[in-house]
Image: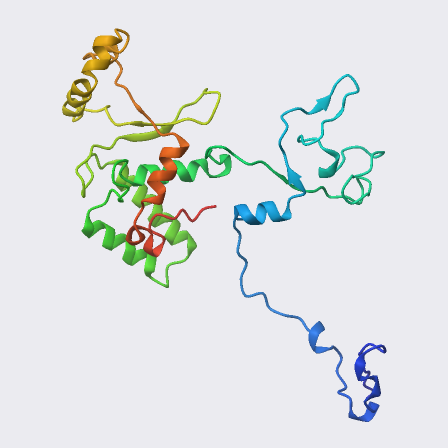
Amino acid sequence: MKTYDTRDSNNADDDVPLANRRKDLLRGDLAPKKISHLQFGLLSPSDMQRVAEFQVCSRELFTMPARAPAHGGCLDPRLGVSDKISICATCHRKMVDCAGHYGYIRLALPVFHIGFLRHTLHLLQCICKTCSRVLLTEHDRQTFLKRMRNPRTDILGKSATFKKVVDKCKKTRNCPYCAALNGTVKKITGAPTLKIVHERFKGRHSDEEMENLANNMENAMRLNKDIAPILQKGANPPFEDLLPTRVLELFSRITDDDCEGRLLMPLDF
């Protein structure tokens, strides 16, 4: 049986006698390899700026009257082209060979990520909107943590456990740690922007909270007559706006114990 040496003829081992070379059908660096794992995630702010071509700083799409792409806008030719004639200003290639390039926008304030809005709602429902602790008693928290830590639990089992955590927290009105009142967290539909509210003062056990709110806003009610009807009995209860800055503050104060074992980490990305 004949054997063939598949090494590159230009390899540095050409000086080694052929009889002393290994007779392999495949070189070691070309042999099939097994992928251990795949990991998906978001780039950090520094990585986004590193891979980007420039900072998008203009809200204009075109310059009039020539209707040319505006410099520094979202249609800047440095980000790529969308027709078969133009040439990319970054790689100097046409649309067939250019896959496009990145730009970044420096935000003045935090905003909600549309891709993670559902998970943001779930996490807000699970934590206290005052102390950021998970809305579970210590016994229930240890029980769910034990399920999450179990090495035999697969991804579907952990996802089902997280859904049970969400359902359990939805039924908790008072925080087990600071006794603050918590209500339903939901997204306002039809709003021009992503808006999340906390219905803290809605429910049978919120009369005391409404009374405290009215006492705290006594001066404002006296100076502004439009606020008084909102706090009257029988009117639609007010809600608390959860702005992105407020949500970021709540998430940053979640303890490591509550995040341990992925107790508060959604698994269905």
Is residue 250 or residue 263 the one in the foreground? Answer: 250
Tell me the colour scheme of the image. rainbow
**Residue at the image position 36 percent from the left and 44 percent from the top:** 252
Q: Quadrant of residue 207?
A: top left
**Residue at the image position 20 percent from the left and 11 percent from the top:** 232
Q: Position of residue 263 (x, y in %)?
A: 33, 51
Q: Position of residue 187 (x, y in %)?
A: 40, 27
**Residue at the image position 33 percent from the left and 39 percent from the top:** 250
Direction from residue 103 to residue 196 in the image, left or right: left
Direction from residue 187 to residue 45 in the image, left or right: right
Q: Quadrant of residue 165?
A: top left
Q: What is the count of numbered marks?
A: 0
Is residue 87 or residue 121 the one in the foreground? Answer: 87
Q: Position of residue 26 (x, y in %)?
A: 74, 77
Q: Position of residue 34 (x, y in %)?
A: 60, 68
Up/down of 170 relative to 22, above or below = above
Q: Quadrant of the N terminus?
A: bottom right
The single residue placed furthest to the top in the displayed view is 225
**Residue at the image position 66 percent from the left and 40 percent from the top:** 54
Q: Quadrant of residue 99?
A: top right
